[in-house]
Image: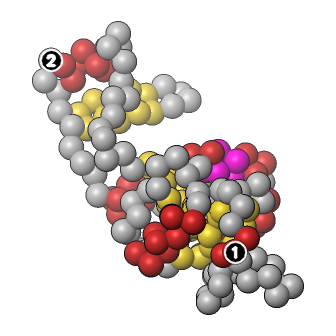
Amino acid sequence: MSVIQIVGYKNSGKTTLIGKLLEILNAMNLRVAVIKHDVHGFEADRESTDTFRHRRAGAVATAITSPWRTAIIEEQETRLSDLIKHFEDYDMTIIEGFKQESYPKIVLIRDKEDLALLQELTQIRAVVFRQEAEECLDNDGTGGVLIGSKVPCYKADEVEEIAKLAIVSILSSES
């Protein structure tokens, strides 16, 4: 199973890119799981549901399943490595966020100020520019490459090329 992180600052287009990648990967009959990091907390259960009532009554974990879907809610943080292990039977797991983890990353850059993020991260496999940032690219005719590195760069609308990078990641994890 292949794991790739999509990272960037808030509103950099992470969720949008993942949605577009999922469309392409699903069309290729690949089974892809997504893990999203949320530092603000979240509520996945609605107040009118039985599982919400179970949690409110004191259950520290609830699960609901049907022939088409399963949801498990636990009142605890789960380590990223455990979540990835849970999805090991899928072709790929895409992680949204968790910037400091050491998985291969596609970094989204909104503008020139976001470039500092590239100095903080490890395992950068590609950079995606949401807005035009031509001054950051080496235009030597070989395609977009971050100046001073061999890291490939893409514009946000080059989703097919970014998907090819993800597919290469899948294929290399199979060997």
Residue type at mark 1 is Glu
The answer to which of 141 and 65 lies nearer the viewer is 141
The spot of residue 153 in percent (x, y) is: 69, 72
User: Residue 158's quadrant in the figure?
Assistant: bottom right
The answer to which of 75 and 139 lies nearer the viewer is 139
- At 38% from the left edge and 69% from the top edge, which residue is drawn? 101
Q: Relative to 56, does residue 143 appear above or below in the rendering?
A: below
Q: Residues within 10 Å of mark 1 (few under 14, many from 20)?
A: few
Per the rendering, the mark at residue 135 is 1
Which span is picked out in magenta?
17-22
Which type of secondary structure does the marked residue at label 2 adopt? loop
Which type of secondary structure does the marked residue at label 1 adopt? helix
Visible in this render: residue 145? yes
Q: Relative to 117, does residue 64 appear above or below in the rendering?
A: above
Visible in this render: residue 159? no
The spot of residue 21 in percent (x, y) is: 69, 52
- At 21% from the left edge and 37% from the top edge, which residue is drawn? 75
The spot of residue 83 in percent (x, y) is: 38, 55
Q: Is residue 128 left or right of residue 54?
A: right
Per the rendering, the mark at residue 90 is none
In the picture of the structure, the residue carrying the numbered disc 2 is 57
The answer to which of 164 and 170 lies nearer the viewer is 164
